[in-house]
Image (cartoon, grey):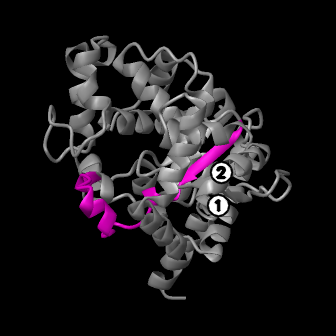
Amino acid sequence: MKQGALLSTLLLFFLTFFYACNPNRLKDVDVSTIQITPVKILRLDQDIFSTKPDSFETATQKMKIKYGGFYNTFIFNVINHGEEHDSVYKALKFFVQDKDMKDVFNETQKIFTDQEISAIENQLTDGFKHLKYHLPQTTLPKQYVSFISGFNCNVSTMDSTLGISLDAYLGQQNKFYQMLQLPKYKVRFMTTDYVVSDAVRGWLIHCYDKNEQLNNLLNHMIFYGKLYYALDAALPEVEDSIKIQYSNTQMLYCKTFKKNLWAYFTEKNRLYNTDLKELAPFVSDGPFTSEISKDCPPRIAAYVGWQVVRSYMNKNPKVTVEQLMNTDAQIILSKSKYKP
């Protein structure tokens, strides 16, 4: 055997051995034995728009039985902000008879066909199986609902229900988004590619955003770092850019300037800053983080926290994802030894 061929063979053997001994703790898992109820999305959007306007008082009783408390959430928090009994039916009638809302509904039906909904159900089922594997104590949704929000939200959670607003995912070039003059930085992520990731992230926030002391920048960074790591666990094959809603250019910026970003946050004791006004630019949504650069993506503190948590989990392979979610931010920072 020639020397070059021998070296190639040895290299191949080494790489095979290396990867065999270093499995990806999130990707290389077997969820075939994880038992969860397969996701089935109830179509509140279709039920609402197929109901005759004068029949809502009768239909409402059936809707409440089918959708439980989420139906009231939809009525009062999504399409109607009043509390008077009579206003409920007036709001529903107005909603389904509004020409634009009818057009929006028809548009969603073209995009979210039975085949597309089935694909989303399968992806969510697989995602929640992975989540249950890594976080066995986490409560999963008991009900999944699709609805039309009138562009008021993308994901809604209430008790045991996970709701997905279909009109939040009609595509970048959708005419309704143009008519509403929605910001380009938002519209870029309003496509079907983001439905599953947004839904799982929304559910994770619903489960873990309780009693968290986000009283300084470090706690905020690590909380969202944990959240995105849990999202990694649930959707290990989904690209980071989709999970955090960054463009490829923004992802490149983060990787190129990771040392600069970390230096910025660690200088002047910024990690322990408790001034909410000063923290806001690093945790808020928008086209960019102006305090750093017009090229720096928004919510940059969450992204950096994500990298710190990843470093912590890589440096501490015996720590489970469930243990991670209950670990103090300062411990994670110290043991992450994060040095980009």
Give the side of residue 226 with respect to residue 120, left or right.
left
Work out whether residue 113 or residue 122 is closer to the camera in this orientation and state it.
Answer: 113
What numbered label is drawn on residue 56?
2
Q: Look at the image and tell me in which quarter the C terminus lies.
A: top left
Is residue 169 part of the magenta span, yes or no? yes
Q: Which mark is first along the chain, 2 or 1? A: 1
The N terminus appears in which quarter of the rendering? bottom right
* Position of residue 46 measured from the top left corner of the image (x, y, whole percent): 62, 63
Local crowd size for mark 2, using a 10 Å CA cut-off: few (<14), some (14–19), many (≥20): some
| Location of residue 338 by image quarter | top left
Label 1 sits on a secondary structure element that is loop
Question: Which residues fall within the magenta stretch?
Answer: 160-185
| Coordinates of residue 326 in the picture (x, y in percent) | 62, 22
Residue at image point 74% right, 57% down: 39
Residue 300 inside the magenta-drawn segment: no
What kind of residue is marked 2?
Answer: Phe
Residue at 63% across, 65% down: 50
| Quarter-of-image position of residue 282 | top left
Label 1 is placed on what type of residue?
Answer: Thr
